[in-house]
Image (cartoon, rainbow, N blue to C red):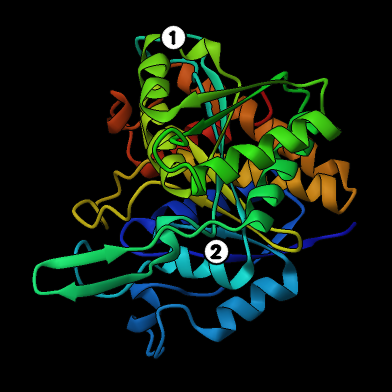
Amino acid sequence: MTIHTVVLIPGDGIGPEVSDAVKAVFEAAEAPVRFVTQYAGVAALDRGKEDLLPAETVAAIREHHVALKGPCTTPIGAGFSSVNVALRKKLNLYAAVRPVRSMPGVKTRFEDVDLIIVRENTEGLYSGIENLITDGVVASLKVATRVACHRIAHWTFKYATHRQRKKISVFHKANIMKMSDGMFIDEARKVHNEDYPNIKYEEVIIDAAHMKLVQDPSQFDIILCENLYGDLVSDLCAGLVGGLGVTPGANIGDDDAVFEAVHGSAPDIAGKGVANPLALLMSGTMMLNRLADTRHDPRCAEVAEKIKRAYSAALEDGQKTRDLGGELGTQGFVQAVIERLNG
């Protein structure tokens, strides 16, 4: 039986706790996975590393091509730059994927939400090019290249076909940013018209799109955005289904993929045993499905489905952590999932 090696980056704050929780569920579910631990962020510095993103961590991902990552701390307004952004750039993880679905037992104002946000992950304002022009004046450069715009559009239409999705909506601000966002929608149109005319396609100005989302999210299926818009839209959509604690994430390139909890490191609750491990566990099931596809191992998909059924049953039975209105701690939720693995 083939065992797939996966790099585990526990992260900071609650990261180690939720990472251990995922490992426990994977072991109980007999997932064909072996984790090798590497570090990034503050956790790397705490272990005597000189860099927030050590070379050996990047090398391990390049060797094994897949990683599962807990949250890493990024300071606001000052201090070091984002480890997440650096990881995406070094590994060319150009497609960020965030499925957003209603969860059983998690009550929100909307039911049956089923969205996928795809975000271009390497350009835009997140290129991090900022300059002090003069005292009190800062310029931030938004970068767009035709190559990257075409690449993410083609990837999204191909992904939609593979997942049997019916419609792609491009959110943009090309009415104002006519060159950068204009290029983004030009390339999406081109891919749609030339390669995937069978998939429904629309373009929606980003501010109107937010209004439409909170009015009726069912009018959208796959949402394609440039970098900054995708970051904002994916968090807004998470709010439609219960928050960041129930939304997984993936960063995917041609060769490598990093699956991650998209919530923060929550240092205020670290070590208290109350963190919700569900987002990282859900990201882990996404990872298993990618292994099934790329390694041609159906066992991975079977285990992913087994874990999904178990955590869905736990939620439906009211077995929830405090952030979702329940009373369970991290280990209590893990145990509830494990008890339902064979149910």
Q: Secondary structure at mark 1?
A: loop
Rendered location of residue 136, percent (x, y): 9, 68
Amino acid type, label 1: Asp
Of the numbered discs in the image, which one, if any, rests on residue 216?
Answer: 1
- Does 283 sit left or right of 188 as displayed? left
**Closest to the observer: 199 or 242?**
199
Name the residue rendered at 40%, 79% in the picture.
Answer: 52
Q: Is residue 137 above or below residue 337?
A: below
**Closest to the observer: 328 or 296?**
296
* Mark 1 nearby-residue class (10 Å; few <14, some 14–19, many ≥20): few
Instruction: Give whichever of discs 2 and 1 has the lower sequence position.
Output: 2
Q: Is residue 318 visible?
A: no
Q: Is residue 307 above or below residue 105?
A: below
Q: Is residue 288 visible?
A: yes
- Does 81 sit left or right of 30 as displayed? left
Kindly identify which residue carries mark 2.
88
Rendered location of residue 295, percent (x, y): 86, 54
Name the residue rendered at 54%, 49% in the picture.
Answer: 22
Amino acid type, label 2: Arg
Q: Secondary structure at mark 2?
A: helix
Residues at discs 2 and 1 in contact (Cβ within 8 Å) = no
Mark 2 to mark 1 CA distance (whole Å):
32 Å
Q: Is residue 78 above or below residue 272?
A: below
- Does 205 sit left or right of 7 as displayed? left
Name the residue rendered at 38%, 69% in the picture.
Answer: 129
Of the numbered discs in the image, which one, if any, rests on residue 227?
Answer: none
Q: Is residue 313 above or below residue 118?
A: above
Q: Quadrant of the C terminus?
A: top right
Rendered location of residue 313, percent (x, y): 55, 20
**Closest to the observer: 139 or 73?**
139
Residue, far left: 135
